[in-house]
Amino acid sequence: MLPGRKTKSPSRRKQRKSYFTATTKDRLKRMSSHLCEDLKSTYGFRAFPISVKDIVKVHSGPYKGKEGQVLEVIPKEYRITVEGCIETGEKEEETKNALIHPSCVTIVKFSMEDGREEKLEKRKNAREETLRRVAELVK
């Protein structure tokens, strides 16, 4: 086992318990979304935790095709709200932002606030280092 890594149980019961009793930090990490092709080629990885003010495109569900800014991240419910995705209530006056699962959106542009740029660069460098090590092992 690698240091800092938790073992992953194959048991469905334990997986569900882990999902529902996760800390906020773990929930935010699990709330990752795929990156668009441009960002994938720039940074070298496929997914990254979603954050407020990221620009995302919804690729599945009733709001498919809509693009907007992430207004809120709700770790307790594993959901996000996106600008332009509005849910109407029974009365016409009742409108609220629809809750969308992060797996249903693709990140188009990152918000570079709160040290996010350093995190992206750190992850990019780690990915490049891993690829370099694998290339050395293959030789």
Image: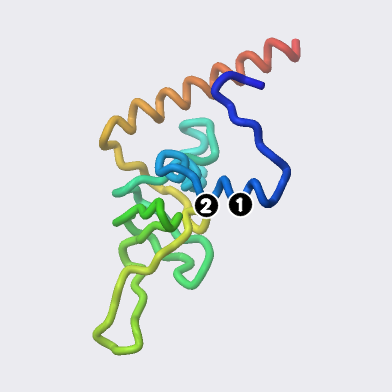
Q: Is residue 68 left or right of residue 57?
A: left
Q: Is residue 133 left or right of residue 58?
A: right
Q: For the N terminus, which image quadrant?
A: top right
Residue in view at x 34 percent, y 59 percent:
68
Q: Residues within 10 Å of mark 2 (few under 14, many from 20)?
A: few
The outermost residue toward the bottom is 91
Expressed as whole percent of the image width and height from the top left, the position of residue 133 reads: 63, 14
Q: Which mark is residue 4?
A: none
Q: Amino acid at mark 2?
A: Phe
Circles 1, 2 touching at the beta carbon (< 8 Å): yes
**Foreground of the two, 114 or 34:** 114
**Foreground of the two, 135 or 26:** 26
Q: Residue under circle 2? A: 20
Residue in view at x 52 percent, y 68 percent:
61
Residue 129, above or below 81: above
Residue in view at x 40 percent, y 30 percent:
120
Q: Amino acid at mark 1?
A: Arg
Q: Is residue 38 visible?
A: no
Q: What's the distance in space between the residues labelled 1 and 2, CA to CA?
A: 6 Å
Q: Residue under circle 1? A: 16
